[in-house]
Image (cartoon, rainbow, N blue to C red):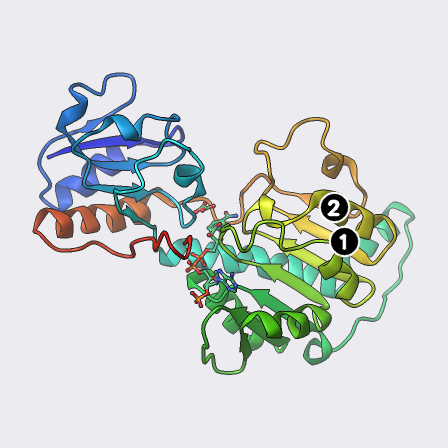
Amino acid sequence: MTIFFHWSEATPDIWRNALTAENIPGDLRFVEDPGALSDINYAVVWAPPQGLLRQFENLKYIFSIGAGVTHITLDPDYPSEVPIVRLQDRLLVQDMSCHIIHWVLHFHRYYARYRQYQGEKKWLRHRYPENSSRRISVLGLGQTGQDACIRLSDLGFNVTGWARSEKTIPGVRTLASNDAFDTVVREADILVNLLPLTPETTDLLDAGVFNRMPRGSFLINVARGSTVVDADLLSALDCGQIEAAALDVFREEPLPADDPYWSHPAVSVTPHAAAPTNEGSAAEFIAGQIRIAMDGGRPAPIVDLARGY
Ligand code: NDP
Ligand code: OXD
């Protein structure tokens, strides 16, 4: 079995050890020296060079070193007949929830004002709503969305979650279907986006959505940049319809130096850092799934290309 590996931030020994622990023979091959491309059966990748995966004629599975898969599927040449296995990882989910909770509390408690008061040496406490009256809408109730909802609900917030299919999450109001989307955005004092990028979610968050949100509401986007119409968000921020946004993902990454988000006073930029892949747990999960495939089983979860995630 030959495994091709591509991730510019990787520590190869961590991955080798994980394969050894699963008794997976052979070594990793890298883009600098991939050997005979027809040997390669499994590709473990984050953002592989465009067109490369298509050249592996005996590829059985692609393993994504990330929960999202657009770093693979946005390549117009990627081999769509080869199943993609997504990363499922407890630590990634935990990190994502921590990032979201950080920004929810920052916005909910208006902490940015204290920074300003500090500059003015002003000793002043401001008021903020009770947690139970702060309405938080979470778009997407997959591995990350469900966990975020539960933790925010545990903090006493009034949480609504939205997905394609019905869900039951204790302490959380859950809604499904396109009709319910209107309610979800109208009642979003804080909107948290955890939707995968698909044809349906591309440009979903536009002026129509921002104008229906309560005046002075907040946006946390940790999903993918192309779910947001940037010009519409900037206009909504400029006029105060959206009071502030915490953006972790962008249409173009790294965010270009001349992008207006960098200097907008109501925008906090983080560099796709909400839930960086934890190498130890990711390698363990992926090695386990490769072992299942080698034993003739079906690794999981496999991306459903018809749904787009
Ligand atoms: P999952 O695939 O586990 O969950 C996706 C959720 O979105 C599901 O609940 C699904 O509904 C819902 N959904 C998808 N399409 C629609 C739609 N058209 N309308 C309504 N609901 C929809 O994804 P994850 O939770 O693992 O990750 C979500 C995204 O977060 C990833 O795709 C990735 O882009 C991003 N991400 C970002 C990271 C970062 O560091 N910034 C790190 C990890 C992920 P249903 O349950 O009904 O199928
Ligand atoms: C992602 C990830 O998909 O980092 O963004 O897992």
The residue shown at (74%, 59%) is 208
In this picture, residue 291 sits left or right of residue 71: left
Q: Could you tell me residue 70's position as x and y percent?
A: 44, 42
Looking at the rendered structure, the kind of residue marked 1 is: Ala
Q: In which quarter of the image is the N terminus?
A: top left
Badge 1 element: strand
Is disc 2 in contact with disc 1, using a CB cutoff of under 8 Å? yes
Is 272 situated above or below 92? above
User: In the rendered view, does 227 fall on the left or right side of 80?
Assistant: right
Judge whether residue 115 can be spotted in this image. Answer: no
Q: Residue at x 90, y 50 (%)?
A: 121
- Give the distance between the C-alpha atoms of the residues marked 2 and 1, in whole angstroms: 6 Å
Q: Where does residue 306 sit, x and y in percent of width and height?
A: 38, 55
Foreground: 201 or 86? Answer: 201
What label sits on residue 267 in the rendered view? 2
- Residue 204, placed above or below residue 151: above
Instruction: Give the answer, above or below, for where 62 lies relative to 220.
Output: above
Q: In this view, does 147 lie above or below 52?
A: below
Circle number at residue 244: 1
Looking at the rendered structure, the secondary structure element under dot 2 is strand
Give x and y (percent) for residue 171.
Answer: 53, 82
Q: Which amino acid does label 2 sit on?
A: Val
Sequence-earlier tag: 2 or 1: 1
Q: Which is more toward the observer, 252 or 272?
A: 252
Q: Can residue 261 be seen in this view?
A: yes
Q: How many marks?
A: 2
Asked whether, in this view, residue 172 is left or right of residue 128, the answer is: left
For the residue pair 58 and 117, the one nearer the viewer reads as 58
